[in-house]
Amino acid sequence: MTDLTYDDVRARLSTAIREAGSQKAFAAMAGISRPYLSDVLAGRRPAGDRVLAALDLRRVERFVSLRRGA
C-alpha cells in the first residue's frame, strides 16, 4: 500500500482524464458531474468515492505521532 497526497490523487486524475479523452468522458464513466470533476481537479473539493473508485483508489485515514520515538 502506498500513501498518496491530494496532489498525487489529482495528478492521477489528470492522467485518467487524458486517457479517457476529456473531462466529460471521464465524468460519464465515473458517474459524476463534470462541474464536480472540475472542482476536484482545482482542489476546491475532495475526491469522493466514485472518483477514487474510477482511479482504483480508496481513502484510508492515518494518524501520525509528532513526538520522537512514539
Image: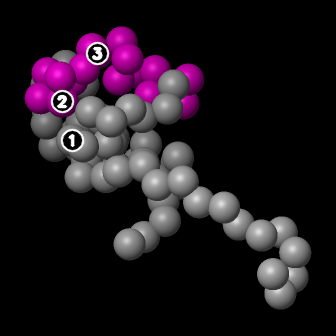
User: The disc labelled 2 sits on which kind of residue?
Assistant: Ala
Nearest to viewer (mark 3 / mark 1): 1
Q: Which residue appears at 43% of the width and 42% of the height?
A: 10
Mark 3 touching mark 1, by CB under 8 A?
no
User: Compared with residue 1, is residue 32 higher up or lower down, i.e. above or below?
Assistant: above
Residue that appears at 35% across and 51% down: 58
Tell me which colouring the rendered structure shows. one colour
Of residues 1 and 61, the one drawn nearer to the viewer in this rendering: 61
**Could you say where residue 61 lies in the image, as x and y percent from the top left?**
54, 54
Q: In what quadrant of the picture does the N terminus appear?
A: bottom left
Q: Tell me if label 2 and label 3 are in contact, CB under 8 Å.
A: no
**Main SS type for the magenta part?**
helix
**Image mark for residue 32:** none
Contact flag, marks 1 and 2 (Cβ < 8 Å): yes
| Residue beneath disc 2 | 30
| Amino acid on which the number 3 mark rests in the picture | Arg
Query: How far is the residue under mark 3 from the one under mark 1?
Result: 14 Å
Q: What residue sits 51% from the left and 25% below the top?
A: 45
Q: Residues within 10 Å of mark 3 (few under 14, many from 20)?
A: some
Q: Which region shows up in magenta?
A: 27-44
Q: Which residue is mark 1?
A: 54
